Amino acid sequence: MGPSVIVAIVVVIVAIIVLAKWVRIVPQGWEWTVERFGKYTRTLPPGLHFLMPFIYGVGRRMNMMEQVLAVPSQDVITKDNAVVRVDGVVFYQVLDAAKAAYEVANLEQATLALVMTNIRTVLGSMDLDESLSKRDEINARLLKVVDEATHPWGVKCNRIEIKDISPPKDLVDAMARQMKAEREKRAQILEAEGSKQSAILKADGEKQSTILQAEGKKEAAYREAEARERLAAAEAKATQLVSDAISAGNLNAINYFVATKYVEALKAMADSPNQKMLMLPFEASGILSSMAGIAEIGKEVLAKNSSVATPR
């Protein structure tokens, strides 16, 4: 192999190397920074590019897709001095490749340190109960702070999620006992409320019953008074008729009146609950003759009515 052949081979190799350095292909989802003698000049988007070898070179290859960064677990002290173990994840995306490459030395490490620090800050300002029940509020506060802090780096934090908040075992047991006590308390309150409502409904029912009974007694008394009034009117009319008959000289009317009162007295004596034997006086036979007087009065009344009803 002569010297010319060796020179030709060297030239071909150098040409291949120069061509490889001259042609650059940036894959989709990535951006490369271009440096001229070590100084940033521009950013290459995805596609085919040509760079002058030995003068221009590729500086940093930046991933422009959304990335996930796992936040390792750490112990955090809450506002009420409870120690909890917290971990999470961060979803971020590089928007400016030049800033992400040259504004911060290690983007992932810086973002991770920033998130862990703010987790301690946010949870340290909250009680244990709030930290366990307000995950959305914690995530929103972390996202706001971290996104503002990473904005100068050309990074956009899309989401920050707290995966797990684990209190110590003794604290979990205490919380379980507290929850049980609260449930028992609520059950007792509900039972007391039920008893109260039952007593109120029972008292209201008794009140309504008493009112209805009073209304019934009132109606009954009204009916009884009306019956007594009618009875008194009838008795007054009967007495007037008897009085008119006596004024006319009819002695049978007197016998009728006396016999009626006599019969009522005997009836009252017979209805007495302590009465075992009823002794009739000898004069009781006079009642029969009085009954005859009643019949005579009836005949006279009928005759009088018939004479008044017959036309002349």
Image (spheres, rainbow, N blue to C red):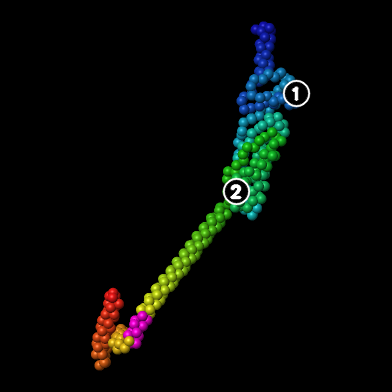
Instruction: Kindly indicate the quadrant of the structure image that contains residue 9.
Output: top right
307 to 40, vertically: above or below = below
Residue 112 can be seen, yes or no: yes
Residue at 75% across, 23% down: 37
What residue is shown with label 1? 37
How crowded pointer 2 is (Cα within 10 Å; few <14, some 14-19, many 20+) is rated as few
Give the image location of residue 97, x and y in percent.
68, 30
> Could you tell me which secondary element the residue under label 2 belongs to?
loop
> Could you tell me which secondary element the residue under label 1 belongs to?
loop
Task: Determine if the magenta segment contains residue 216.
Answer: no
What residue is shown with label 2? 134
Task: Tell whether 255 sits left or right of 4.
Answer: left
Report the disc number at residue 163. Answer: none
Front disc: 2 or 1: 2
Q: Distance between the Cα atoms at labels 2 and 1?
A: 52 Å
Q: Amino acid at mark 2?
A: Lys
Judge by depth and name the residue closer to the eye, 104 or 297. 297
Judge by depth and name the residue closer to the eye, 140 or 97. 140
Q: Earlier in the sequence, mark 2 or mark 1?
A: 1
* Image quadrant containing the C terminus: bottom left
Judge by depth and name the residue closer to the eye, 288 or 78. 288
Give the image location of residue 139, x and y in percent.
62, 44
In magenta, the rendered stretch is 235-247
Residue at 50% across, 60% down: 190
Task: Determine if the magenta segment contains residue 236.
Answer: yes
Outermost residue to the front? 312
Give the image location of residue 287, x and y in percent.
26, 88
Task: Tell whether 236 sits left or right of 70.
Answer: left
